[in-house]
Amino acid sequence: MLALGYIHLSSLLQSVPLLLPYDRLASKPADVNAVMIDLLDLYIHHLAATHIGPQYPLTKFMELQIAIRRSLVGETEREEEMELPTEREASAGDRGTIRFILDKDRVVMESEILGTLQ
């Protein structure tokens, strides 16, 4: 699986189309994509410490990783509309770290807890 990840990633970096016979190699495209994402993490975070990292701009690795991650997302999930978090309330003050919570029930629960503490 690791070798397939390197081979496929190399083809993407060189912009050379490659069709891997996943069935004959006892692998799945999603597994090879997961390996490539891990490899791209290495190149993104330790670019100078790798052999091929300095040969490409950082943006190339980031764009490839984004494209691979998007391909892993199922079509149905892509089509669903995601609810965006609302803006931070001005009355919340500066409590340190600002974070987005995508679980609406948790947002409501935390807002109620913060409301009782004030």
Image (cartoon, helix red, strand yellow):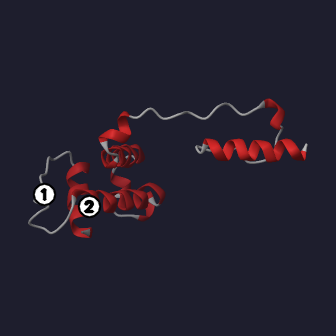
The tag on residue 20 is: 1
Q: Quadrant of the C terminus?
A: top right
* Image position, residue 43 (x, y; %): 40, 58
Q: Is residue 32 left or right of residue 16?
A: right
- 58 relative to 118 in the view: left or right: left
Q: Is residue 25 left or right of residue 65?
A: left
Residue ID at (70%, 41%): 108
- What amino acid type should be assigned to the residue bearing mark 2? Val
Q: Marks 2 and 1: CB-CB under 8 Å?
A: yes
**Kind of residue indicated by mark 1:** Leu
- Residue 12, compared with residue 87, is above or below; it is below
> Label 1: how many residues lie within 10 Å, few (<14), some (14-19) or many (20+)?
some
* Kind of element beneath mark 1: loop
Give the labeled residue for mark 2: 32
Q: Is residue 49 above or below residue 114?
A: below
Image spot of residue 112 (x, y percent): 79, 43
Q: Give coordinates of residue 25: x percent, y percent.
A: 13, 68
The residue most toward the right is 118
Does the rendering let one see residue 95?
A: no
Q: Is residue 118 or residue 64 the one in the foreground?
A: 118
Of residue 9 and residue 112, the one placed in the foreground of this image is: 112
Does label 2 or label 1 sit earlier along the sequence? 1
Residue 41: percent from left, percent from top: 42, 58
Q: Tell me the SS state at disc 2.
A: helix
Residue placed at 44% from the left, 32% from the top? 81
